[in-house]
Image: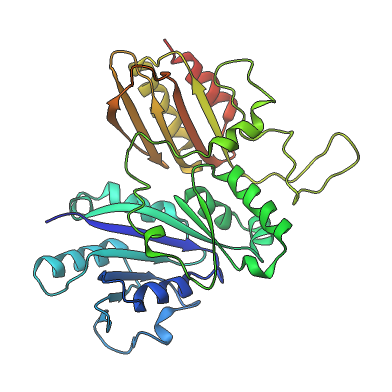
């Protein structure tokens, strides 16, 4: 049986997750979707669509979608759905997991890698984060969960941008890009998102394409390109409109603790040294490392090495061969909470051949 693709839908309270889900569940797109509601109270989708009074946790929708409301273990719900599909009792093509507005998507994502039984049935496609343009600046300032959700995203949908000015939306886009440069951003209205922007994004595929907006890197390049590895994606010279400026010339601001930085190197990595160093870093800082991904130039192979991780879990894969005229450059992006940037940069530099 082919692996069942799974999508994690996250976003702060009121960001429009339920609206988006209702649309996915009621639209005639010909896909049979199983939704796992990992919600506790707040804004449940079941009020209009689901009858939760039934003893059965799984409810079949009119358009062939399935809904499963969980109050306990996600792993059990995933196993139950996969078992029913295998037995021919339920027919669905993919799974969407809606997390509660306060949830950290990390442990949900890890379920797909740590649990062999789940890994044999499912493929984690991507983490989608909804951001409410009107309330996001405040939520990002006040709530680390909101910042973590942005850090984890493979795709960011900005909702309610019609309620704020163009400048405010641009400032938000800029801020989100500094937190997570690898997630494309898209404005959406009332949950109207083409299904193609939601599914089969392959955010967790170890592919050779490292999704970092090229302009994002350019914007900060002028500050540092003296030495290898210091492509500072986020430095003191950044001036988000949302930051308070004090005095002239030199400004202080409350920086988001979720940040990204990009590391580049032209010399190849020594595989053993790199593995030891990344293993040690992940061991110590794993809980603060949200997502990290890279396309690496390794000594001893003509192929690209693709690596990525979530928290303490890290995987790597051989990608395609380097092209004849292609510059063999390693590029890595790290997204995390108060990451020890200097330690990472120095350590990575010491792993180069």
Outermost top residue: 353
Where residue 51 sits, quadrant-wise, is bottom left
Instruction: Tell me: residue 256, above or below residue 217.
Output: below
Where residue 66 sits, quadrant-wise, is bottom left
Instruction: Tell me: residue 59, above or below residue 338.
Output: below
Q: Residue at x 83, y 38 (%)?
A: 251
Where residue 210 sits, quadrant-wise, is top left
Instruction: Tell me: residue 350, above or below residue 313.
Output: above
Specify whether 19 is left or right of 272: right
Q: If the image is split into quadrants, where does the C terminus sit?
A: top left
* Number of marks: 0
Outermost front residue: 325
Relative image position of residue 193 (x, y in whole percent): 45, 66
Relative image position of residue 73 (x, y in whole percent): 31, 65
Q: Residue at x 49, y 34 (%)?
A: 333
Q: If the image is split into quadrants, where does the N terminus sit?
A: bottom left
Please indicate, yes or no, whether residue 312 appears anywhere in the rendered image: no
Residue 314 or residue 226, whichever sits in front: 226
Outermost right residue: 247
């Amino acid at each position: 049986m082919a692996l069942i693709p799974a999508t994690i839908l996250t976003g702060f309270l009121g960001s429009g997750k339920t609206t988006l889900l209702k649309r996915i569940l009621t639209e005639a797109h010909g896909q049979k979707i199983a939704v796992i509601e990992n919600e506790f109270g707040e804004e449940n989708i079941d009020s209009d669509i689901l009858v939760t009074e039934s003893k059965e946790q799984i409810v079949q929708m009119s358009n062939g979608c399935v809904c499963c409301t969980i109050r306990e273990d996600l792993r059990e719900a995933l196993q139950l759905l996969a078992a029913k599909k295998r037995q021919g009792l339920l027919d669905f093509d993919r799974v969407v997991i809606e997390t509660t507005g306060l949830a950290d998507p990390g442990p949900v994502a890890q379920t797909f890698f740590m649990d062999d039984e789940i890994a044999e049935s499912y493929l984690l496609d991507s983490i989608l984060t909804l951001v409410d343009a009107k309330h996001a600046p405040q939520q990002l300032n006040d709530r680390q969960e909101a910042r973590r959700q942005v850090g984890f995203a493979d795709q960011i949908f900005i909702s309610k941008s019609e309620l704020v000015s163009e400048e405010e939306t641009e400032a938000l886009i800029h801020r989100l890009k500094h937190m997570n440069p690898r997630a494309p951003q898209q404005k959406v209205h009332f949950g109207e998102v083409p299904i193609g922007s939601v599914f089969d994004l392959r955010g967790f595929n170890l592919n050779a394409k490292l999704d970092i907006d090229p302009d994002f890197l350019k914007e900060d390049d002028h500050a540092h390109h003296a030495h290898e590895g210091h492509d500072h994606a986020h430095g003191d010279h950044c001036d988000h409109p949302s930051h308070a400026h004090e005095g002239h010339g030199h400004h202080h601001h409350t920086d988001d603790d979720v940040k990204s930085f990009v590391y580049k190197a032209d010399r190849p990595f020594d595989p053993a040294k790199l593995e030891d160093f990344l293993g040690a870093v992940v061991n110590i800082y794993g809980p603060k490392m949200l997502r990290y991904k890279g396309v690496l130039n390794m000594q001893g192979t003509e192929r690209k090495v693709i690596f990525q991780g979530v928290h303490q879990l890290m995987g790597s894969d051989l990608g395609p061969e380097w092209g004849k005229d292609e510059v063999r450059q390693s590029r890595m992006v790290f997204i995390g909470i108060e990451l020890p940037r200097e330690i990472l940069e120095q350590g990575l530099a010491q792993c180069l051949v």
